[in-house]
Structure formats: structure tokens, C-alpha cells
Amino acid sequence: RKPSARTKKCETCKKSHDGTYGSGRFCSVRCANTFSSTAKSRKATDERATRKNTTKRRAAASRKESGYDDEEASEKERAATRRLRGNRRDQRATCELCGKSHRGEYGSGRFCSNSCANTFASR
């Protein structure tokens, strides 16, 4: 291709060039590929966001039509979580190393303290 009399500006790096590469929009293969991959990535991100928002809107509309109460459901979930946590705290456990009774709140609940867990692990 013949170089143009005017210098052109690359759409990616904004440097001036003679326009001999490809159609003249970019100064090199690197700039053309960077532009292309950036555009594709941006498009994919936009599509994912649109899909996610559409799904959320549809779910909300469906809940509203069926009479589902978000506030009431959230309270029920919080109450169930409190019950589960409370049950675990009420149970007593025995340390596998020293045999001491404890609440089972440390780590997985097998040991009463960090020192017992480390001693057990180093055996």
C-alpha cells in the first residue's frame, strides 16, 4: 500500500505514523490487537452486567407477583442463623489433647486453645 501524504494518529497509542500498516488506523500489530482485545473485553463485561441486572429485575418482579415479602424472609433467615449459632455455643466440647471442657469456638472446635492445637500437630 502507498504511504499517505498525511500522517495519521494511532487509535491505541496516539502516536503519529505514516498509515502503511493495515487500513491505517493503527501503527502496528500490537496496537491493533490491544484495541481489539480491549473492545471485546469491554463488550463481554457490559453483556455480563446487563444479564445480571436483567436476572435480578426478573427475580424481583416474580417475587412481587407471588406476594413474597423480602423483609419477612430476611428476618426468618436471620432468626435461623441465630438459632444455629446459639446451638453451637451451647454445646460443650472436650479438648483432644488436654481433655479440658470448652465451648468449641476455637478453630474447628477440636482443641481448647492454639497451644493445644500446635502441640497436637507437632507430635
Image (spheres, rainbow, N blue to C red):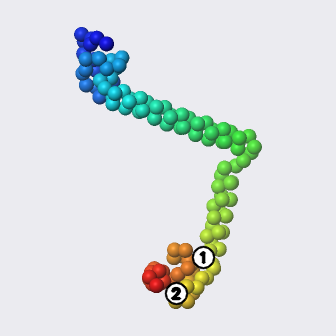
Question: Relative to residue 12, is residue 59 depicted above or below?
Answer: below
Q: Which amino acid type is shown beneath numbered disc 1?
A: Arg
Determine the image quadrant of residue 24: top left
In-image side of 69 versus 106 (left or right): right
Q: Quadrant of the N terminus?
A: top left
Element type at marker 2? loop
Q: Between residue 59 and residue 20, name the one nearer to us.
A: 20
Which residue occupies 29% across, 28% down?
Answer: 13
Q: Residue furthest bottom?
A: 99
In-image side of 102 versus 22 (left or right): right
Q: Residue furthest right?
A: 66
In-image side of 11 versus 75 (left or right): left
Please rate how many residues cluster around mark 2, counting C-alpha atoms within 10 Å: few if below 14, some from 14 to 19, many from 20.
Answer: some
Which residue occupies 28% across, 20% down?
Answer: 9
Mark 2 = which residue?
97
Q: Residue furthest front?
A: 1
Does residue 69 appear in the picture of this structure?
Answer: yes
Please rate how many residues cluster around mark 1, counting C-alpha atoms within 10 Å: few if below 14, some from 14 to 19, many from 20.
Answer: some
Q: Between residue 54 and residue 13, name the one nearer to us.
A: 13
Does residue 12 appear in the picture of this structure?
Answer: no
Residue 84, percent from left and from top: 65, 69
CA gap, disc 2 and disc 1: 20 Å
Q: Between residue 44 and residue 25, name the one nearer to us.
A: 25
Which residue occupies 36% across, 17% down?
Answer: 23
User: Which circle marks residue 73 in the picture?
Assistant: none
Element type at marker 1? helix
Mark 1 = which residue?
89
Q: Which amino acid type is shown beneath numbered disc 2?
A: Leu
Question: Relative to residue 99, is residue 58 depicted above or below?
Answer: above
